[in-house]
Image (cartoon, helix red, strand yellow):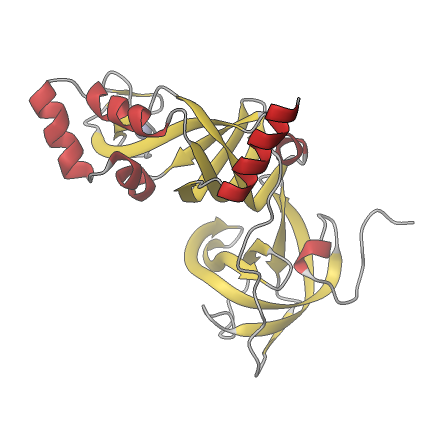
Amino acid sequence: AVPYEVGGDATLAELSPGDRGITVEVQLLEVERKIIDGRDGETEILSGVVGDDTMRLPFTDWEPRPEIEPGNSVRIENVFVREFRGVPSVNVSEFSTAERLPEPVEVQETAPRWSVRDAVESGGLFDVELVGSVVAIRDGSGLIERCPECGRVVQNGQCRSHGEVDGQDDLRTKAILDDGTGTVTVILDENLTAEVYGGDLADAREHARDAMDRGVVADAIRGRVVGHEFRVRGSLSVDDFGANLEASEFEEHAVDPGDRARELLAEAGE
Ligand SMILES: [Zn+2]
């Protein structure tokens, strides 16, 4: 048997890198215009997220067409599948055709829940839910500075690519989540960090100024999350440096009282 599919209809969950000539019916959840340096100079492409009733995946349209609009449901023939950061990515080319569907394609609202070990061993998952306890906050959390040129985190006023720069303040959290099967670094962006910190960037600056120590912001975040259980949804990538989950949702996980009672009974019976 060939290791990849050629032709036919497929759900997003059935796609693997290497598949080609595939037809999918999807809803366009996010669409972003990008300018890239192509062979023939600058070209415009579309990229974003598609979904069906099995899952969500990233996509790229190399020949932008009007049917590819946020909210549209489309039948796209002749797509090919590539690997992008460890997950299958749907590629729409000049040889693909897109037709708008009259009825919206149903989209799976929740992400599948995985154990940390299985998620990391999969090599990458575009949209996954993990539940575990935050055991620590890594360096580079709290009130950080980014290079105005490249966005990388600046340490001691130095960007690794641009040398001495005037860093721009930002909020970020790198939390180590442990579910008993493994650990993953969960990265919270400015908005999610502001939620757990309980204040925005201006509040964090004032906090640091009053304390004359930028570390107080990370300390406050540490105090709110370490030792607590969270449900996290996001995109997991795995490389030689470890497993990182860029979070889109980060919520304290309320333990079901019924489950907790059963656990206590089980423990008492041991
Ligand atoms: Zn830089």
**Looking at this view, is 42 or 268 the one in front?**
268
Q: Nearer the viewer, residue 176 or 83?
A: 176
Residue reaching furthest to the left: 210
Does any portion of residue 61 appear in the rendered image? Answer: no
Assign the C terminus to one quadrant of the image.
top right
180 sits left or right of 78 in the view: left
Please state the horizontal and vertical placement of residue 166, each as a whole percent of the image: 18, 27
Does residue 55 appear in the picture of this structure? yes
Q: Position of residue 231 (x, y in %)?
A: 47, 41
Q: Quadrant of ligand 1?
A: top left
Q: Image check: 59 left or right of 203?
A: right
The residue at 42%/55% (across/down) is 34
Q: Position of residue 197 (x, y in %)?
A: 26, 34
Q: Is 159 in front, or is 27?
A: 27
Outermost bottom residue: 102
Reply above or below: 67 against 126: below
Left or right: where 84 falls relative to 200? right
Residue nearer the viewer, 114 or 28? 114
